[in-house]
Image (cartoon, helix red, strand yellow):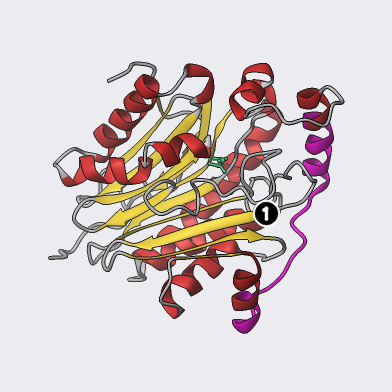
Amino acid sequence: MSEKRNPVIVVHGGAGRWHPERSQPGLAGVKKAAKVGFDIINNRGTAVDAVMEAVAVMEDDGSFNAGYGSSLNIEKEVEMEASIMDGKTLQAGAAGLLKDIRNPVRLARIVMENTDHVFVVGKGAEKLAKMFNLERRDPKTELRLKYYEQQKEALLDGKFELPKLSELIKRHIEFFELETVGAVALDKDGNVAAATSTGGFPLKLPGRIGDSPSIGCGTYADNEAGACSTTGVGEVAIRLVLAKTVCNHMGNGKTAQEGVELAVKLINRKMPAIYNHMGLIAVDSHGRIGAAHNSPNMCWAYLTPKTQEPITSLTAEIVKESL
Ligand code: ASP
């Protein structure tokens, strides 16, 4: 049963290594997103509306790897993806392989509310976007094109072969600024929601689908537990079904903070160190927030009636131990 709650929103702009010159725009972006989302739930809007609009703000910002400013794949193309989940109904929607949808999260919501499916990609997703008159925008920015050239040169040393992802990270960790975006919220009616959006891992193979649109991996929400959004190496979050793992902890009585920390400890135990740069945000059904990572940074913000203004940071609880 939903009860009256104080509204809470937590957003992230990605784990990884936030370079000093990019930190201010990142912090300003998550601050704006938290404010937009919070204003919705503070005025009796739903958690689903709040996470969607918060993520849309970050997709429009240009500072993040989502929407405008998405990372490029190995073929210099953008393939965006996003998901959203309503903890009240367990309805969920996701879309992937998107080339020019301005706000992939809005398409994810269209999938959730207007189809019988959870996940639609490629041509079908593009058709759906057309049917619902979603706005288009070329997501490529000068910055990402510059990163692409640098990354490709460094990673491939001029050779056109793609080593395994873990090898890429081991050799060139400095290039893996992840910057995926996500949001979790609890509204006044006690409903939780989560949403996540990304251009995906830089230099990914065409057609690769990551954790961000995968329900249970990058995004999960259940009123009986809470909501979670993840960032980092998508394959790790998929293999550990990370967002659902955090929700299981919260459903079993752990706080949101305990849930995300336990999840990072699990990552540290199960996955080789070089491959495990991850970050998580969560809110539990009591409105307690959680944020933890094992990457150098995670750009994030939260806002509750107590804080009045968004609290922003480039680090949360950095967890290095294993379970
Ligand atoms: N999780 C995203 C992916 O692997 C990357 C990120 O978090 O920035 O697609």
At mark 1, the secondary structure is: loop
Point out residue 128 in the picture as x, y percentages from the top left corner.
Answer: 59, 77
**Residue 134 lies within the magenta run:** yes
Q: Quadrant of residue 22?
A: top right
Question: What residue lies at 48% left-to-right and 26% top-to-bottom?
Answer: 276
Write the start and end of the magenta stretch as one range: 129-151
Q: Position of residue 51 (x, y in %)?
A: 44, 59
Q: From the viewer's perspective, tell me whether residue 204 is left or right of residue 306.
A: right
What percent of the width, then of the height, locates residue 84? 44, 61
Give whichever of 218, 28 is nearer the camera: 218
Residue 274 versus residue 26 in the image, above or below: above
- Residue receiving disc 1: 79
Query: Ligand 1 shows up in which quadrant of the image?
Result: top right
Work out whether residue 302 or residue 170 is closer to the camera in this orientation and state it.
170
Looking at the figure, which quarter contains the N terminus? bottom left
**Residue depicted at x 29% and y 61%:** 87
Amino acid type of disc 1? Glu
Question: Can residue 9 be spotted in the picture?
Answer: no
* Count of marks, rendered view: 1
Would residue 209 appear left or right of 310 to someone viewing this image? right
In depth, the one of 237 and 28 nearer the eye is 237
Q: Quadrant of the C terminus?
A: top left
Residue 256 belongs to magenta span: no
Question: Dot 1, how many residues are within 10 Å of its Cα: few (below 14), some (14-19), or many (20+)?
Answer: many
